[in-house]
Amino acid sequence: VQRNDTPEQADIQHMSIARVALLLAAHHQTTAFPIGLRSLGRLRPVSSVRLSSTMDALLNCPKLELNDGSLHPQIGFGTYKVGFIPASASSAVADPSDVNKVERTAQECVVDALSVGYRFLDCAQFYGNESEVGKAIEESGVPRPDLYLASKVWTTTIEEGPAAVRAQVMKTLSDLGTDYIDLYCIHWPVPGKHVDAYKALCELQKEGKIKTLGLSNYAVEDYRELMDAGVSVKPAINQIEINPFLYRKNTINFFQGEGLAMQSYRALRDGKAFGHPLLVEIAEKYGKSTAQILGRWCIQKGCIYIPKSVKIERMKENSYVFDFQISEEDMNRLDSLTTPEAIEKFKNLYQKCVNRDTSKDGTLDGVKLDITLD
């Protein structure tokens, strides 16, 4: 953008660049790379070196083989609070004016994410923006087979029962503009309800509506309850908060030992830890940003990294996590950032959220009080 451009001209130019980038990304992906796991940074058909390197990092990212044989990209774009902030989001509860602090629409943000090369989109009923995500997918022109789409069913629907879960999955498919979804998860293990909800997902998988089944925010004890119920399909994913400030090592090791891949939300701590002295020190050592250090830590733990931003430059920055390695010593130093206070805060959040937005909201009715915390 030239220095004397008006804001309106800058916006038009930015929109044009995004659309051109989408076309370049599609060409780059379909003509330059073989299918499957691919090495980084070999082919650069895009003229812009910066755009090309971002696309290489994203289109050519490692993929984890799940326990059902499918491949899952190790980096994706998170859509929580992108263009919409749910009324019961913790930030909105703390500050009701937060619901109005939306900088850009979800459609605009997701179009940008797709333009720079993100292909895994992490969605959810609770996020309230799946129709906008669907519009962005349509606008992008990225072929459906090149995308990895994931979603989650919210507590209110889980409480209503299997028929409501089925209806929500169908709504998600319609909103996203697809006839199948790559991954669908139970968002929280609602007491007395989550097992039947998961069984409903098993039936939808048989019908071809869902490719892979997963969980979110499950403690070890919730998972055992699910498996003890004799479900027909083992989940392949558990999405929980994972970062150096909440590193629940025993929980992660348990699920990985069970053959589940771990997705990380809040990998960047919502930007609230970027100024931490240890992060700053390590970032300077490796010539990276603190966000990239947090992302690389997540990757080296074998987890799926789901950064989010409403700014295209940050989307690009967040993708540069595959071109360096953090030493074992520095990884251990980062591990040590989890405090007993953080574990206690997680415990309180878990006990609050499993009944969140249901008829038992605000109570401990049915909530497991003795779970694996670390």
Image (cartoon, grey):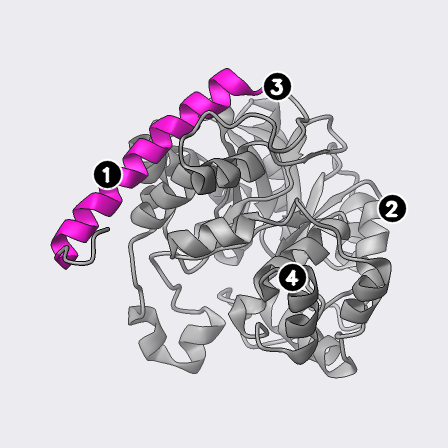
Query: Where is residue 178, by image quadrant?
Result: top left
Amino acid at dot 2: Gly
Q: Is residue 265 left or right of residue 336?
A: left
Q: Is residue 112 above or below residue 95?
A: above
Q: Quadrant of the C terminus?
A: bottom right
Which residue is found at the position 76% from the left and 56% from the top? 326
Tell which circle, 4 or 2, labels the residue nearer the N-terminal end: 2
Circles 4, 3 touching at the beta carbon (< 8 Å): no
Marks 4 and 3 sit apart, C-alpha to C-alpha, by 29 Å
Tell which circle, 2 or 3, labels the residue nearer the N-terminal end: 3
Which residue is found at the position 75% from the left and 59% from the top? 219
Amino acid at dot 3: Ile
Q: Nearer the viewer, residue 220 or 57?
A: 57
Q: Secondary structure at mark 3?
A: loop
Q: Secondary structure at mark 1?
A: helix
Tell which circle, 1 or 4, labels the residue nearer the N-terminal end: 1
- The residue that mark 1 highlights is 16
Q: Secondary structure at mark 4?
A: helix
Marks 3 and 1 sit apart, C-alpha to C-alpha, by 29 Å
Tell which circle, 2 or 1, labels the residue nearer the N-terminal end: 1
Amino acid at dot 1: Ser
Using a 10 Å C-alpha cutoff, classify the residue at mark 1 as few (fewer than 14 neighbours), some (14 to 19) or many (20 or more): few
- The residue that mark 2 highlights is 257
Amino acid at dot 4: Leu
Q: Residue 294, which numbered label?
A: 4
